[in-house]
Amino acid sequence: MQNKGKYYITTAIAYTSGKPHIGNNYEIVLADSIARYKRKDGYDVFFQTGTDEHGQKIELKAAEAGVTPKAFVDDVAGVIKGLCDMLNISYDKFIRTTDDFHEKQVQKIFKRLYDQGDIYKGAYEGLYCTPCESFWTESQLKDGKCPDCGREVKPAKEEAYFFKMSKYADRLIDHINKHPEFIQPVSRKNEMMNNFLLPGLQDLCVSRTSFKWGIPVDFDNKHVVYVWLDALTNYITGIGYDADGNSTEQFAKLWPADLHLIGKDIIRFHTIYWPIFLMALGEELPHQIFGHPWLLQNNDKMSKSKGNIMYADDLAEVFGVDAVRYFVLHEMPFENDGSITWDLMVERLNSDLANTLGNLVNRTISMSNQYFGGIVSDKGAAEEVDEELKAVVTGTYDKVEAKMDSLRVADALTEIFNLFKRCNKYIDETEPWVLAKDDAKKDRLATVLYNLVESISIGAGLLEPFMPETAARIMKQFNSAIRDFDSTKTFGIYESGTKVTDSPEILFARLNPKEVDAKVEVIAAKQKAASDGSATQKNDTDVINIDGGSDAAIDIEPKDEITYDDFAKMQFQMGEIIACEAVPKSKKLLCSQVKIGSQVKQIVSGIKAYYTPEEMVGKKVMVLVNLKPAKLAGVLSEGMLLCAEDAEGNLALMTAEKPMPSGAEIQ
């Protein structure tokens, strides 16, 4: 295969707030199949993925777990990388946004953009979504909630640096119009143009002061660089970009990226913000940005709160890694969302993998052993039916190539399995078991079996980028090397006289749906136990046990025993914080208005170091209601919010395991 030049492909970097579910992992499998295909097709591929590790949500998660943000992200990044390795992902670089080289370049990029007038200092007042780390205007909300994730937004105001987006908007519009392939699918391009670019861009907030877990703005250390300017630049920092003009040879070779593969939910950041940042830096834009659809669980978005999350390692335990890869690649349409269920996985494994492919390979090897002692020979006893088989088999590469050129990976897999289906049809047409009864047709029988082995070998060569372990297992049983793409276009390369394995292995065993259901129940119980035994998580990812978290324990000095009568004097109830503000001239105190049943109490708490006023609003908390009122820093406090404290003095508000109404008594 001739060298076709470089091919730089990236995924969105995974956010380290928790363990990603299979809907998140779909993207990395999709990218891996494209990267493997391009390598095999003659490209010099560089495949980068990694983790996004800064932001307010991470800071909150770490506080809830009782560890530092760095300890938290170290643990979660390890989980994410482990899932990539388990899924057989062939990445060339795994970048973390806490890597020193990345952080230094982000600071230099920020300073350069500030010095050249693209970034200025101002103040932001708007509606903020903490999970998405995005500000919105009232008009941008959908039913009063975040238009991206559908969660509640809260008013926020703070000093911030802003990027002048409108300065580059016309240039970006012109680029998109001149390069129709830049944003794919076309529906995503239309959405960005009509909903964001053409109505006019607002300046973008690129720093924050309300939390500390981020890359500091080195000339104004009250600020940290906002997540998108930090995270998006990984695509250039990871390959040696230097904002001072001393970029590496690798950067010169690889940039611009050939493909940014991302989820449709972050298409705006990649097709508007990122290209504008690059324009400001004087760098070329990536060739293509593909916003893939979502993989849903039974047509519903996966969410821990809905109890419908499926994880790649659990799926692989039941079905095997290549079966999981096949499913997520094959079941995802080019433009519309796909769906996954345990039942559908069983159905696809039994029909496509166990029957169409596995049974085909097993029958072919078994017949070769039964009739010829495993020796596969081309005796040249051809008939007309062979030509149709050969035409389908040798023509498959061109069909797959056309599909892959347009990133229609599911359709490419379908073409390969059409090849295997044609082989099964060929068995029905030639009836080897009938030929075996006639000694005069022995050469014809040998030729039929040779044609099958050769056809499957070509199919395995095409299958390798998508299901690498399966392709290797097939060719190992055929005692032959995996084909390169060039040799999939020619029929007759398999060496006549080669002996196949004596003992064919079952590639994919058929599964009993009831047995799978039993395994799913065990997995669900395991997930529930892990969730019950860990810190409360409020995002849509899995719970991660980290050092110092739920498995850690501390001892405190015991107090004097009390009687039940002493305890009964204290009145504990659930309260909902409806307003909160910092206490003037106090570094520690927040003043909350807490709704308890039909009344509202004002409570002052020393938790300013752990929660912002905006974060407090909406929380359901445990309250000691009948504590004698007292003044703290001159402000009246009419109760106490209950908190847990770890050995380092970190605090976390106590909340109920299940939703409870305001005023509910705690006993």
Image (cartoon, rainbow, N blue to C red):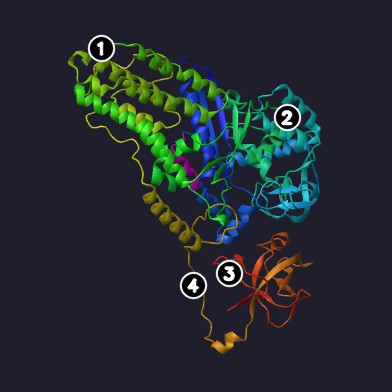
The residue carrying pointer 3 sits among few (fewer than 14), some (14 to 19) or many (20 or more) residues within 10 Å by Cα, namely few
Q: Quadrant of residue 607?
A: bottom right
Q: Which residue is mark 3?
A: 644
Q: Which residue is mark 2?
A: 279
Tag 3 or tag 4, which sits nearer the N-term? 4
Location of residue 278 in the rendering, given as x and y in whole percent from the top left corner:
70, 31
- Distance, label 4 to label 2, CA atoms, is 56 Å
Mark 1 or 3, nearer chain start: 1
Circle 2 or circle 1, nearest the eye: 1
Q: Report, in whole angstroms, how far the alpha carbon at label 2 lies from the one at label 3.
A: 48 Å
Question: Where is the C terminus found, in terms of image quarters?
Answer: bottom right
Magenta residues, dominant SS class: helix
Q: Nearer the viewer, residue 243 or 382?
A: 382
Circle 4 residue: 555
Residue 379 shows which numbered tag? Answer: 1
Name the foreground residue: 2 vs 557.
2
What range is drawn magenta here? 78-89
Look at the numbered discs 2 and 1 and tell me whether their residues touch, using CB distance below 8 Å: no
Position above or below: 416 against 53: above
Q: Residues within 10 Å of mark 1 (few under 14, many from 20)?
A: some
Q: Amino acid at mark 1?
A: Lys
